[in-house]
Image (cartoon, grey):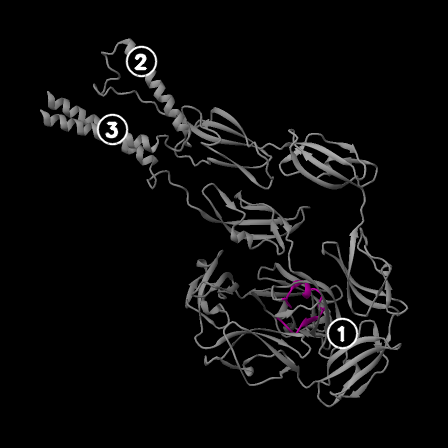
């Protein structure tokens, strides 16, 4: 009899332990649960537009899409194709649909300075120039490759220098002709007959013909022409178009970044590989940085590199030292430069002969010099075969027009020509022809003014020093060295701070401060909330048409607040106005639905704090709101419990829930029978009242913790396991007493 009862009690306690263990698996960390969908990479077509809806570019990229079907605006692959000089106005997550339209805004770039550039040919003839803005780095240098500088290079010419140049405000750049001035119209078609590129191109015409080789530099990257020899210029002029068939020479583009053993980024970029299109390329097709070699070698599958950026490890070549060299002439003009591998025997001593010099220049200093890895060296050069003379320019009235050192006599025969000199803007030679070169002499050369007046360069700035434009202006028509500010053309909407006369020298640059022409009425505004708390304010320019009536919409409000009163109001210059605002509430409506789509409950939440629309407020389950009583989050459904919504907006969110299962209590004295049949109705009522009180206390405790796939707390599960084990121990102890 006892054994039968003992066996029955052991079975009950064993069942209790099993149920407790099952519950603990659902709530304990690092246990098996719902399998999350893995992130995957998908192709995205992005279009970038400005605030006015203008398309600024776009393209395809590969982004990582999470288990919720979202990608991040911050994805590196997407950020790489944002138009240069712009940044996204959106952040956070975006739902993936295959394509996206993204608003961008121009980046305010620090370090930009205005540069006056003069372009000359090898003989010193001025071919053009002008002002542009370039980016100056922390070392005070700008790059010849700066896109804004490249845009003002005379058409048909290219610079003979590259690399960095120290910024002084002015620069003289030697250019060379890239094509003869014969233009033909060309279009390139691929194997399918589709036009893939084309336009107007300079070619070197002779006897009415040009050679297809003149177009090699404009063939679309990754293609080659199927034609060679000569072509008639007439085929591409007078409305005619020359059609040239091209075939692919590289079927794949891969993107790599080079890094050394220490993890330093050594550059990289896009490389065309796999010219035969078999899906396999050799790493020898990728050029490593100067002085380095790739660690990995041999053939690779294109598919392993496609659509992503691959990091390739490189090792420095054991012998040799990498140094940075800047070439300059005797006048300090930058002639280019770059990184060079020298000192191949590794003894710390290099020779100037190891450097590749700019075309047309020669070393002044020769022999050996000490080098250290990564250091920068300035090397002074002379033009090949030329002499340096010192020149002073004067006007016919004796006014000093400047001058300086000039390279002349490139053939070295001791005879130079006045045409080899670069003259001040607006002047011309009176004396022309040849003259003998004497490097010890200062040449005083009188010039004639071509147009009455003095040319000066003007940069306009506001009171904070912000650049408002400018340019070259003709002033001082009587050539007395004095100009008047009224001779200048001002930017629209601005007026002079200083007026009257000022001294001028030809070619010099003048910074002139302007102020914005005020139109409208200036009023002082203090913003307060409905409890009269001060929210800030200041001076505002309103009533642009000057009719004495402004509109509340003209005011810039504190972040997170909105107007109570709208429309027009009367204003008077200098008057003070107090304007009451209300907080722009952030509202979220949470709808709870069961797995059948039936609405169980809804709850409307308010943030209760002000915030910027560019920022978001979080409503968190278990902190800001609770699940409906008797419900838990539906199992097997991925759900967001930290809901993000922009400040000042109204939104909704749906959560899927399911009813919490209810089990009949088991009498521990008589397992398998609900309740004790010997209990009186009075004791039964007392027990129910106690159970209800316990359930209410448990509900209060549960409400402090967000509900997840299982609503059983860890403590409750552990307690259940402890009670079950205690019951087993008690049974065993009781058996021993018998």
State the residue position of label 2.
686
Q: Can you give x and y, in whole percent of width and height, for residue 692 in the image?
A: 35, 18
Labels 3 & 1 near each other (Cβ < 8 A): no
**From mark 3 to mark 1, how far is it between C-alphas?**
98 Å
Identify whether 52 is placed above or below 239: above
State the residue position of label 1.
126
Identify whether 363 is placed above or below 88: below
Judged from the image, the secondary structure of the residue bearing numbered disc 1 is strand
Closest to the camera, between mark 1 and mark 2, is: 2
Q: Residue furthest left?
A: 738
Task: State the image quarter where residue 220 is shown.
Answer: bottom right
State the residue position of label 3.
723
Residue 19 seen by the camera: no
Q: Can you give x and y, in whole percent of width and height, for residue 326 in the image?
A: 60, 74
Judged from the image, the secondary structure of the residue bearing numbered disc 2 is helix
Q: Can you give x and y, in whole percent of width and height, for residue 568 in the image?
A: 77, 32
Q: Does residue 280 appear to the left or right of 737 in the view shown? A: right
- In the rendered image, residue 141 lying in the magenta stretch gets the answer yes
Task: State the image quarter where residue 315 is shown.
Answer: bottom left
Name the N-terminal-most of marks 3 and 1: 1
Closest to the camera, between mark 3 and mark 1, is: 3
Identify whether 589 is placed above or below 503: above
């Amino acid at each position: 009899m006892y054994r039968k009862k003992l066996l029955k009690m052991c079975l009950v306690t064993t069942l209790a332990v099993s149920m407790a263990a099952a519950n603990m698996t659902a709530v304990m960390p690092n246990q098996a649960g719902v399998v999350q969908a893995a992130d995957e990479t998908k192709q995205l077509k992005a279009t970038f537009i400005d605030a006015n809806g203008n398309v600024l570019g776009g393209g395809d990229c590969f982004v990582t899409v999470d288990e919720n079907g979202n990608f991040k605006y911050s994805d590196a692959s997407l950020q790489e194709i944002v138009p240069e000089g712009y940044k996204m106005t959106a952040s956070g997550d975006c739902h993936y649909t295959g394509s996206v339209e993204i608003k961008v805004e121009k980046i305010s770039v620090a370090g930009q300075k205005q540069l006056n550039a003069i372009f000359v040919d090898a003989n010193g003839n001025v071919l053009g120039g002008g002002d542009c803005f370039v980016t100056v780095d922390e070392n005070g240098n700008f790059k010849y490759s700066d896109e804004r500088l490249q845009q003002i290079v005379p058409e048909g010419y290219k610079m003979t220098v590259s690399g960095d140049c120290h910024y002084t405000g002015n620069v003289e750049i030697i250019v060379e002709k890239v094509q003869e001035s014969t233009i033909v119209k060309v279009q390139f078609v691929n194997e399918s007959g589709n036009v893939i590129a084309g336009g107007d191109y300079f070619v070197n015409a002779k006897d009415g013909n040009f050679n297809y080789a003149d177009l090699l530099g404009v063939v679309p990257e990754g293609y080659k022409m199927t034609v060679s020899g000569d072509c008639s210029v007439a085929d591409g002029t007078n409305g005619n178009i020359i059609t040239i068939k091209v075939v692919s020479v590289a079927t794949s583009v891969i993107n790599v970044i080079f890094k050394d053993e220490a993890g330093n980024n050594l550059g990289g970029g896009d490389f065309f590989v796999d010219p035969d299109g078999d899906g396999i390329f050799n790493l020898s097709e990728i050029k490593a940085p100067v002085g380095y070699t790739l660690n990995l070698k041999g053939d690779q599958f294109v598919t392993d590199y496609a659509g992503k950026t691959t990091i390739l490890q490189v090792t420095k070549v054991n012998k040799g030292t990498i140094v940075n060299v800047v070439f300059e002439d005797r006048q300090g003009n930058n002639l280019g430069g770059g990184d060079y591998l020298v000192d191949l025997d590794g003894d710390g001593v290099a020779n100037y002969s190891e450097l590749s010099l700019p075309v047309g220049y020669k070393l002044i200093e020769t022999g050996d010099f000490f080098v250290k890895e990564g250091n920068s060296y300035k090397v002074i050069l002379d033009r090949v075969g030329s002499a340096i003379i010192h020149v002073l320019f004067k006007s016919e009235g004796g006014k000093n027009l400047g001058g300086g050192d000039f390279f002349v006599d490139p053939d070295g025969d001791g005879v130079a020509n006045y045409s080899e000199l670069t003259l001040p803007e607006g002047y011309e030679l009176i004396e022309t022809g040849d003259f003998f070169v004497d490097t010890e002499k200062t040449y005083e050369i009188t010039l004639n003014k071509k147009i009455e007046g003095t040319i000066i360069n003007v940069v306009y700035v506001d009171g904070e020093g912000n650049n408002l434009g400018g340019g070259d202006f003709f002033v001082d028509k009587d050539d007395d060295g004095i100009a008047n500010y009224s001779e200048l053309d001002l930017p629209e909407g601005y007026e002079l701070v200083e007026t009257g006369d000022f001294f001028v020298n030809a070619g010099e640059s003048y910074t002139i401060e302007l102020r914005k022409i005020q139109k409208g009425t200036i009023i002082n505004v203090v913003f307060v909330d409905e409890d009269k708390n001060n929210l800030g304010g200041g001076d505002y320019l309103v009533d642009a048409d000057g009719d004495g009536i402004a509109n509340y919409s003209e005011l810039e409000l504190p972040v997170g607040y909105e107007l109570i009163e709208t429309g027009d109001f009367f204003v008077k210059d200098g008057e003070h106005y107090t304007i009451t605002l209300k907080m722009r509430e952030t509202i979220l409506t949470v709808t709870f639905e069961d797995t059948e789509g039936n609405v169980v409950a809804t709850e409307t939440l308010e943030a209760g704090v002000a915030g910027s629309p560019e920022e978001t407020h979080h409503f968190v389950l278990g902190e800001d709101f609770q699940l409906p009583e008797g419900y838990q989050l539906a199992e097997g459904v991925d759900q967001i419990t930290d809901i993000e919504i922009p400040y000042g907006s109204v939104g909704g969110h749906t959560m899927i829930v399911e009813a919490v299962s209810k089990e009949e209590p088991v009498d521990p004295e008589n397992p398998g029978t609900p309740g004790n049949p010997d209990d009186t109705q009075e004791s039964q009522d007392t027990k129910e009242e106690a159970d209800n009180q316990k359930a209410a206390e448990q509900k209060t405790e549960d409400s402090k913790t967000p509900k997840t796939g299982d609503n059983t707390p860890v403590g409750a599960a552990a307690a259940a396991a402890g009670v079950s084990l205690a019951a087993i121990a008690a049974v065993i102890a009781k058996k021993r007493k018998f």
